[in-house]
Image (cartoon, grey):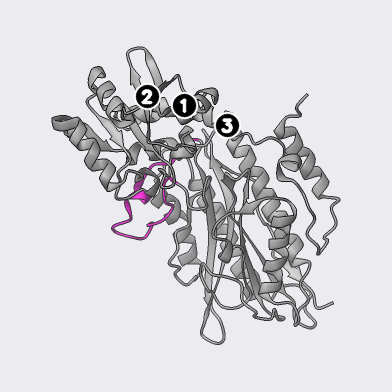
């Protein structure tokens, strides 16, 4: 009997509490350790449960995706086209009989694609035929008026159609090319919402990310340890437990005990008493779902048992900003309204301005598809900041307070948490950081 992957994941979390912090990387087989990858079933549910509504919300009759080998569409593995060899056409549409999916595939891949049991029908195109032409003929036979294609100026996930593919498609469809519309809104509507089981996986990823950061802080020896040393400790955790990086490995994690460096890499700066330390870290579970969490610490000076009043004030201010942002995250709110809720508190607390948005969608990548939580003080916020939050959207967001250091440089506490929008508001995925982590000299 196969043990449920979710049960295995829960058991693994229990084991973490008793795992020692070995400096040597252990050899763990990810599939055995984490359990069977749940993506195939989740992908199928996302197509059948979420995509029909996304088509309606985007006001399109049909979505045409072209998949191919080596230079594939970024949406390919969301629809089962990641193993395409020759050109394959994927069609998703609503009609009077409901929602349907149809694929025109070369013979070399059609059998395996059909056995995935994702699509209603996989048609094996004959030798010498064209999957694109067969799709165009089918579209014409159905009389679809608005056909979404992956060509977008604002969403990379909706911009997989190459220039030459677009030319070929328009040549085949002829005068009906005016029916082709961008899939920007469709991809937004579909990918921005996460299923409950996806949120649970992200919850596990967030907890591991936070736990490992706290463990990393326990490794610090003031005056000896460098930011890079702590980053290497977290890299060993990634390797040891068979997970992936939440974003570009060169900048994950970012450990920063000096002035702000933005999205960057950890340097050889030695961690010293009086430093406020930031760890920005994310992991990827099952090669699919990512976390994005920040944790902050203060290195006590000789004779200190608590953080100085000013540092404690900065911390409490940033925490208040996080709570204000969470309270503003509810279905129907704009991303800019979430950002504004925090900006008001920042100004009242005397914070320096910060150039970053309060938050961003997180899920399949660290900066995922969905509303931007920014632009609260802008007279012309970016379009994504005017998008409405909806139930099932997941975000990583910061509580900010920035100040000038004695040397004139700037430091920001940006405690970053993850949350999911619910029917009644929003909730943290894990318990947020409530207190600064204090690192003693002994």
The image shows residue 240 at horizontal and vertical percentages of 75, 55
What element does badge 1 sit on?
helix
Check residue 110 in the rendering and tell me which mark sits there, or answer none: 1
Residue 384 highlighted magenta (yes or no): yes
Measured as percent of width and height from the top left, residue 118 is found at 50, 25
Q: Which residue is situated farthest in the bottom direction here?
A: 407
- Horizontally, residue 427 falls left or right of residue 159, namely right
In the image, which residues are magenta? Answer: 369-391
Are circles 1 and 2 on residues that touch, CB within 8 Å? yes
In the depicted view, which residue is nearer to us: 342 or 247? Answer: 247
Spatial separation of the CA atoms under disc 1 and disc 2: 9 Å
Judging by the rendered image, the residue that carries numbered circle 3 is 40
Which quarter shows the C terminus? bottom right
Looking at the image, is mark 1 or mark 2 earlier in the sequence?
Answer: 1
Determine if residue 161 is in view: yes
In x, y percent, where is residue 63?
33, 31
Q: Measured from the top left, where is residue 32 in percent x and y? A: 75, 40
Q: Which residue is mark 2?
A: 125
Q: Earlier in the sequence, mark 3 or mark 1?
A: 3
Which label belongs to residue 208? none
On screen, residue 100 versus residue 35, left or right, reads left
Task: Name the residue rendered at 71%, 56% in the picture.
Answer: 239
- Mark 2 vs mark 3, foreground winner is 2
Q: Secondary structure at mark 3?
A: helix
Quadrant including the N terminus? top right
Q: CA distance from mark 2 to mark 3?
A: 25 Å
The residue at 32%/56% (across/down) is 381
Left or right of 18: which side holds 403?
left
Is 381 in the magenta?
yes
Q: Residue at x 80, y 82 (%)?
A: 303
CA neighbours of label 3 inside 10 A, class few (<14), some (14 to 19), many (20+): some
* Label 2: how many Cα within 10 Å (few below 14, some 14–19, many 20+): some
């Amino acid at each position: 009997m196969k043990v449920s992957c979710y049960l295995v994941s829960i058991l693994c979390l229990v084991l973490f509490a008793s795992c020692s912090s070995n400096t040597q990387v252990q050899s763990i087989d990810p599939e055995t350790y984490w359990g069977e990858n749940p993506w195939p079933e989740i992908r199928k549910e996302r197509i059948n449960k979420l995509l029909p509504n996304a088509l309606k919300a985007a006001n399109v009759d049909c979505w045409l995706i072209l998949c191919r080998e080596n230079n594939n569409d970024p949406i390919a593995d969301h629809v089962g086209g990641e193993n395409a060899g020759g050109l394959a056409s994927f069609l998703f549409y609503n009609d009077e009989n409901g929602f349907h999916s149809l694929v025109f595939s070369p013979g070399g891949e059609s059998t395996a694609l059909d056995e995935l049991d994702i699509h209603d029908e996989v048609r094996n195109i004959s030798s010498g035929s064209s999957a694109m032409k067969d799709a165009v003929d089918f579209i014409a036979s159905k009389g679809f008026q608005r056909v979404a294609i992956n060509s977008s100026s604002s969403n990379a996930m909706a911009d997989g159609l190459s220039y030459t593919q677009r030319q070929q498609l328009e040549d085949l469809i002829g005068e009906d090319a005016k029916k082709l519309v961008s899939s920007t809104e469709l991809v937004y509507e579909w990918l921005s919402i996460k299923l409950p089981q996806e949120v649970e996986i992200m919850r596990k990823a967030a907890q591991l990310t936070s736990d490992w950061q706290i463990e990393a802080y326990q490794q610090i020896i003031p005056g000896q340890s460098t930011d890079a040393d702590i980053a290497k400790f977290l890299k060993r955790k990634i390797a040891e437990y068979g997970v992936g990086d939440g974003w570009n490995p060169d900048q994950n994690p970012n450990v920063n005990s000096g002035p702000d460096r933005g999205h960057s890499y950890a340097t050889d700066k030695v961690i010293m008493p009086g430093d406020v330390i930031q760890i920005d870290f994310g992991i990827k579970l099952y090669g699919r779902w990512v976390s994005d969490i920040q944790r902050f610490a203060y290195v006590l000076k000789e004779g200190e048992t608590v953080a100085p009043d000013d540092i404690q004030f900065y911390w409490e201010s940033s925490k208040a900003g996080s709570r204000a942002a969470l309270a503003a995250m509810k279905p129907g709110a704009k991303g800019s309204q979430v950002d504004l809720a925090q900006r008001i508190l920042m100004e009242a607390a005397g914070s320096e301005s910060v150039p970053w948005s309060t938050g961003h969608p997180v899920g399949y990548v660290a900066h995922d598809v969905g509303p931007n939580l920014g632009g609260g003080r802008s007279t012309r916020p970016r379009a994504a900041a005017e998008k409405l939050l909806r139930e099932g959207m997941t975000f990583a967001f910061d509580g900010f307070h920035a100040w000038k250091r004695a040397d004139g440089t700037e430091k920001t506490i940006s405690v970053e948490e993850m949350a999911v929008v619910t029917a009644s508001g929003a909730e943290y995925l894990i318990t947020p950081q409530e207190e600064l982590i204090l690192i003693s000299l002994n």
